[in-house]
Amino acid sequence: MSSSPAAAASSRPNILFLMTDQQRFDTIAALGAAPALTPNLDRLVRRGVACTQAYSTCPVCVPARYTLMTGCEPSRTGWFSNWQEPAKPRETCGAYLAETMQAAGYRTWGLGKFHTEPRTEPLGFETQEYSEELWPTEEEFLADDYVKWLRDRAPDLHHLEQVHGERTEMYYVPQLRPQPKELCAEAWLAGRAQEEVRRPDPRPYFGFVSFVQPHPPIAPPIPYNRLFDPDHMPAPALGDPGLDTMDDYLGWMNHAVWAEDVSVGRAKLLRARYAGSIAFIDACIGRILDAVEEGPEADNTLICFFSDHGDHLGDHRAWQKESFFEASCRIPLLVSWPRRLPADARSAALVALTDLFGLATSAAGRSELRQGQDLLAVLERRVPARSHLLGVFGTPGTPNFKAMVREGDWKYLWLCNGGREALFNVAGNPEENECFAAREPAVTARLKAALVASLQAESATQPALSGTTLVAFPFAPFPRVRIRQFARGVTDFGQGPVPR
């Protein structure tokens, strides 16, 4: 006799995605990070499987998020960077993840940063509430759900132009959040997530909680601003200047946010506050985990924690992201489901954000992998993991385009600007300060051929090729410009009333 629909629905897991922004892979204490204070992420490590070779295949905010929502790579979403004409991924990829989960009978709710274009694009969540890092207008800023919550509770903070810290020339200057911790966006997210986890409903839920931090500005609240002594933080890891600066786009990125001359001392200050920001997020995640574990379906709740990309934090003389150095593109990714997956396990499989669409749909009993692999089956060791992983950034056929191929211990990089290439051994030389391209010509040729084949397979990436040859451009430095990151209708310095 077949089970009733109600019984079948109740056997499906709740699914909870927890996402941070710009969190490096090497930031979780249980996975060896030090100094770090992450007792709740450590709980998740013990609760399930830590994917130790997880990547963001287009390591910047908007493309990474569309990859997550569609299960497709930039070759399908059309998003190769933040700086382009908006693409329409729903038309090229199909229904978004929340829409797909809702159609599968899930109650869907999403909270926090979504960073879509347009910013308020419907994503299919029955409940969707925003805490975005920037809004282009005062009207949109005041409509932000966290901002409304904050202004209702703290009228004395109505003057704040930017509620997550001061940006523009202060982007990589250590800061203190102006709000007390209980009024920060992270605390609001934790409280709202607890409410949604505890909300009675006969349906299982698919929940998405997305933190703005530790994305700059790096501004943890008291007391998280003083948890780590800057003198005890590691200095940035530098390699050969020629190798570190091979990708001139990183120099452009540094200049764009006034980070072209960050001293070692300031870098260690920033790293201390970055670790403090993660410790605060960890405490807020702990509140959400408590709500899950108090419920009757704790063992049948799949929790996936991940970030959209990392941050160089001065490694390779770089700040921000948008490169294929490990600090930028490798991410933390934890998957736990006590009813199905082993506890306190590790997986060295090559994993990408693209796989999370299939993870959720497979757990829901309606597997739809799109361009990802069957991560649930990989973690249960029912199928082998992918043999190699492709990453791309920048519009194919332009000097901005660059790509990565990961395979085994090797990573191959291609830069259109100058036709430059590099080969790293990420196991033997995790600092990526040695180039093996000349010493390992067979590996270089094999991974380069794999890149060409991958680019040939998708029409959107074929402009990066001329026949079977990678398109290269004579090297030219990217023009240095500043990015103005003001808020609430202010677009540049000198605007607004001048105090008397």
Image: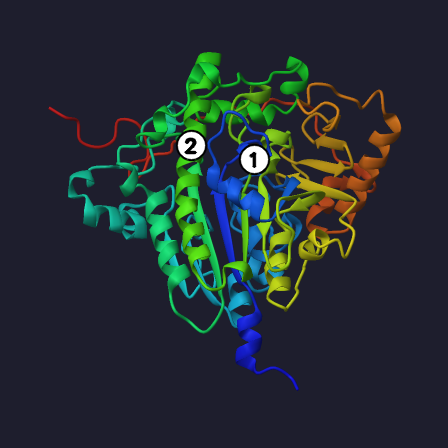
Q: Quadrant of the C terminus?
A: top left
Q: Is residue 372 left or right of residue 16?
A: right
Report the front residue among 310 and 65: 310
Q: Earlier in the sequence, mark 1 or mark 2?
A: 1
Q: Residues within 10 Å of mark 1 (few under 14, many from 20)?
A: many
Q: Residues within 10 Å of mark 2 (few under 14, many from 20)?
A: many
C-alpha gap between disc 1 and disc 2:
24 Å
Report the front residue among 115 and 32: 32
- Where does residue 120 sit, x and y in percent of width and height? 40, 55
Residue linked to disc 1: 30
Location of residue 451 with respect to 227 vertically, above or below? below
What is the secondary structure assignment of the residue under circle 1? Answer: helix
Q: Which mark is residue 216?
A: 2
Q: Is residue 471 left or right of residue 181?
A: right
Residue 359 visible somewhere in the drawing: yes
Location of residue 166 with respect to 344 vertically, above or below? above
Location of residue 2 with respect to 351 vertically, above or below? below
What is the secondary structure assignment of the residue under circle 2? Answer: loop
Residue 2, picture quadrant: bottom right
